[in-house]
Image (spheres, coloured by chain):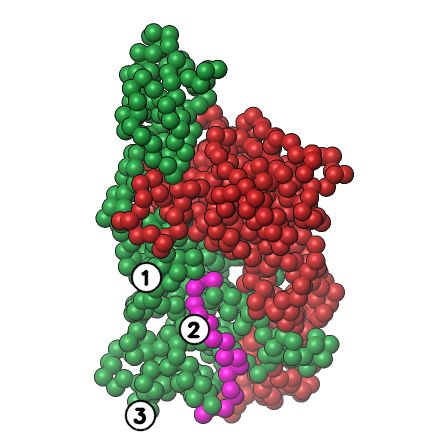
Chain colours: A green, B red
Amino acid sequence: MSHTEAPRRTGLMSLEDALAQLLGAAQPLAGQESVATLEADGRVLAQDIRSGLDVPGFDNSSMDGYAVNSAEVAAAIAAGQALAVSQRIPAGHFGLVLQPGSVARIFTGAPLPAGADAVVMQEEAEPQADGSVRFQQAPAVGQFIRRRGEDMRQGDTVLPAGTRLGPAELGLAASLGLAALPVRPRVRVALFSTGDELVMPGEVAPEDMAPGAIYNSNRYFLSVLLRRLGCEVSDLGIVPDRREATLEALRAAAEAHDLIVTSGGVSVGEEDHVKPAVQQLGGLDLWQIAIKPGKPFAHGWIARSGQADPSDQTGDPGDAAGRCHFVGLPGNPVSSFVTFLLLVRPLLLRLQGISAGQGVQAQPGADGLPPGLALPAHFDWPRADRRREFLRARRNAAGGLDLFPNQSSGVLTSVAWCDGLVDLPAGRTVARGDSVNFISLAALLG
Amino acid sequence: MSHTEAPRRTGLMSLEDALAQLLGAAQPLAGQESVATLEADGRVLAQDIRSGLDVPGFDNSSMDGYAVNSAEVAAAIAAGQALAVSQRIPAGHFGLVLQPGSVARIFTGAPLPAGADAVVMQEEAEPQADGSVRFQQAPAVGQFIRRRGEDMRQGDTVLPAGTRLGPAELGLAASLGLAALPVRPRVRVALFSTGDELVMPGEVAPEDMAPGAIYNSNRYFLSVLLRRLGCEVSDLGIVPDRREATLEALRAAAEAHDLIVTSGGVSVGEEDHVKPAVQQLGGLDLWQIAIKPGKPFAHGWIARSGQADPSDQTGDPGDAAGRCHFVGLPGNPVSSFVTFLLLVRPLLLRLQGISAGQGVQAQPGADGLPPGLALPAHFDWPRADRRREFLRARRNAAGGLDLFPNQSSGVLTSVAWCDGLVDLPAGRTVARGDSVNFISLAALLG
C-alpha cells in the first residue's frame, strides 16, 4: 500500500463529536430479504407495511351480550315487553338480518347483524324463562360496536420502513395477514480479540493459569451484545501475533463482514499488529474520548477490494459499498462494555437503518443514548472527573439510585450488578439527594 | 374422570390476588443442564457460581506508564536525577525484580514487578534522550496499582443461583474461566389458539378473507414474547373443534410441556372445547381480573399421568412434579398482550426460579411488575374505570407521557406505538400534568 499514513490521533474529544464522526461515516446497509413473520423478532423493516384490509373488517361487537335495534328496545321497555332472541352469533359467524321485534345473542368479536345498531352487554339484560330477554335501558346507537376500519383502513401505512420489529409489531403485521416481511440484512460482524495475556475459558483451568494470564471475557459479552442487537457474529478468536497473518485475517474478514470489532490494543502505549494492519488496508483514527470508563477508541475502515481506494480524499471510514467498518474497543472489560453501548450500539442502529419513534427505546439522541431519567442519587460522588462519567448504579426500593462501590473495577462485577448508568457531565460531583441522569440498561441492551 | 366439577368462577379479583394465586401454585422447575457460556444468554443459573481464582490474579498496573519504587523516585527528584528504565513489561508478561535505582516501562494490565510499589502514568513522565526518564513528583505508594483479589477473591460467590444471565453476567463468568454454566431447564410452553374466526396469515389473502374471519395475530406475539423470556415454544396451532380431539391434544401437550397457553375462549359467554377439556383433565378456575385491558383469564392444570390426582384436595393448579400449568388468555390482541405481561411473565420468572437483584429488571414486585417511574401525564383521562387500567403511552421529548389516542383498540397498533404502560389505579382520572406511574416496555420484554 503506497499511501499509508500513520493513524490520526486526536486530543480528548467529546462523546457527541465521536458519535457524529462515527455515524457520519456510516450508511444503512443496502439490500433486503424476506423473513417469516414468526422469525423476524429484532429485524428491521426494509419497506413500509401498508394494510391490505380494513381492521376490523366488519362492524362487530366489543362485548358479550345482545345485538339490538335501539329504538325497538326503547319501545319494548315502554310497553313492558321482553324481546325474542331470534338468532345466536358467535365470533367467526355471520348472522342473518335482524328480524323486526327481536334481538340477537352475540359474542365479542362477532359481526353485527344487519338491522342492529347497538349492543347491550349481557350483564344488563335479563333472560326470561321462555328464551326472550328484557332490558332496563335502551342503548345509545353505536354502543359497544367496533366499526369497520376503526383501527386501520386499507392502504394505511401501519409500520414504516426502518421499524425495528418486536412482539407487538409482529403481531400487528400478522393481523394484516402477512406471513413474511421484507427486512434489512443483518449486520455481519467479525469479532477479534487481541492480547498475549488472554486465555480462552475452558482451555486452561484456573489453578493452572500462567502468571500474568487472564481469561478473555470481552469475547463473551461482546458476542452476546452484538447478537442482541440483531447482528450475525463471526467470532474469529485471537488476532494472530504476526504481521502478515494479521493482514490476511483482517483482509479476509473485511470481505465477508460489514464491521470488524476488536478489543484491546487501542491504547497509545499498547503494541499490537492490528492498528498498522488496519492502517495499511484502509484507514484508522485513534480517538481519545472524554468518557470514563472508556477513553481509547479506534475507528477505521478496510477496503473490501483488498486495497484502499486511491480516489478517496477524505480519509473517512467505511461505507456500504466498498468498505468494511472497523472499531477497536479498549481491552479493560468495563471500558469495553460501556464503550460498546455508547458508540458501537448507535453505529449498529445506523447500519440497520433503524428510525425513531417506533415504541422501541432503540433510537439514540444526539449523544447516542436512549432518553434518561432524572432520579435522586442515594450516594455521594465527591471527586469530579474532567471526563464525562458513566457510573454503574441501580434503582433501589426507595426510588433512588445506589452506586456500585468499586467504580474502577477491571472486572464486570459492577456491570452485572447495575441496572443502568448514571450519566455524569464532566467536572460534576454528586451529593446525596441530587437529581442525576440515569440510563436504563434494559433500554440499552434491547 | 369421575370427580370433574365445573370450573370455579370468581367475582372481580385484584391483580395482586390473581398473581398470588398464580405464583402460589408454581414452583421453579427441577433439574439443570450445562450450557456453553457463549450460548447461555437469557438462561438462569441453577447453582451459585464461585470464583476459582483471585481477580486480578496478581498486582498489576491500571495505567500505561512506569512501575517505580516511590521512595527512589522521591530521592531522584531531590537529587535532580533521571532514573534508568531497566525493563519493559507488556500485558501478559512477568517482569523481573526491579533493579534498585531503576524503573520499569509498564502497560495497562501488566503485572507489577517485585520491588515496585506504584505506577506513574506516562503523561507525567519525561523520557530522556539516553533512554532514562525524569519525574516531577513522587507517586503515593499504591498509586495506579490494581491489587490481587481486589475485584474477587477465590471462593467468593460471584453470581448466585437464580441469576438470569445477560451479557455482563456471561462476561463475568468467562473472566473466571468458565466455558460452561449450570443452568435451569428452559420452560417448555405449548401454545394453542382457539377461535373459529381465526385464519393464519399466508393461508388466505386479505382480499379473499371470508366475512367475519380475522387473522391470528396472538400466535405471533405470544410466541415471540415467550421466546424472549427464554421459553422453548411449541406452536400447536388451532385447537381442534371436536371434544375428543381437544382432550387428546391437551393431554399430549401436557406430557411434554410445563405450561400450556391458549388465547381466546376464556370469556364467560364464549364457547369452546378447551375449558371443559382442561377441567376434565385436571382443574380450572375462570377469573375475572379487575384490569383493563384484560379481565377474563383462565388458570388451571392438567395431570401429567393423564388423570387428575385424586389425593389432591386443594384444587390448586399445577406443580412441577405431576402437573402441567394451564393459562388461558383473552382473545382480544391488546388484552392478550397486556395480560401476558401482567400475569404470564411473572409466572415464567417463577418457573425459572429467577431471583431478585441481579441488575436485570426482571424480578417482579408484589404486583408482578418491574419498578415504575413517576412521570408527568401530557394527556387528560377524564373517565375513571372501576378496573385498574394499563394505558398505552410513550415518553415524549419534553419528558412527559403521550397517550395513544385509541385505547380501546382491538388491534396492536397501540402496543406497537407505545414504549410503556401507564398503571392507573381503579377509579382514578388523570389531568394533564398529573404524575402517573409508567412501566417501561423494555423492562417488561427482557
- Helix, strand or loop at label 3? It is loop
Q: Which chain carries label 2?
A: A
Give left or right: position of B146 versus A142. Answer: right
Which mark, by number, is residue A182? 1
Query: Do the numbered discs 2 and 1 sit on residues whose CB atoms are within 8 Å?
Result: no
Mark 1 and mark 3: span between their CA atoms?
A: 43 Å
Q: Which of A48 and B252 is in front in this view?
A: B252
Vertically, is A444 above or below B344?
below
Q: Which chain carries label 1?
A: A
Determine which residue is flagged by label 2: A189
Residues flagged by tags 1 and 3 on a common chain: yes
Q: Which chain carries label 3?
A: A
Q: Which of A336 and B326 is in front in this view?
A: B326
Vertically, is A278 above or below A87?
below
- Crowd tier of the residue under label 3, counting other residues whose Cα lies within 10 Å: few below 14, some 14–19, many 20 or above: few
Q: Where is residue B248 in the image (x, y as percent from the top left)?
A: 59, 48
Residues flagged by tags 3 and 2 on a common chain: yes
- Helix, strand or loop at label 2? It is strand
Which mark, by number, is residue A2? 3
Mark 3 and mark 2: span between their CA atoms?
A: 28 Å
Residue found farthest to the right:
B311
- Crowd tier of the residue under label 2, counting other residues whose Cα lies within 10 Å: few below 14, some 14–19, many 20 or above: many
Residues flagged by tags 2 and 1 on a common chain: yes
Residue B236 visible within the image: yes
Span of residues in magenta: A228-244
- In the rendered structure, which amino acid carries the disc numbered 1? Pro
Which mark, by number, is residue B127? none
Q: Where is residue A58 in the image (x, y as percent from the top left)?
A: 30, 37
Mark 3 vs mark 2: which is more N-terminal? 3
Q: Where is residue A236 in the image (x, y as percent from the top left)?
A: 50, 79
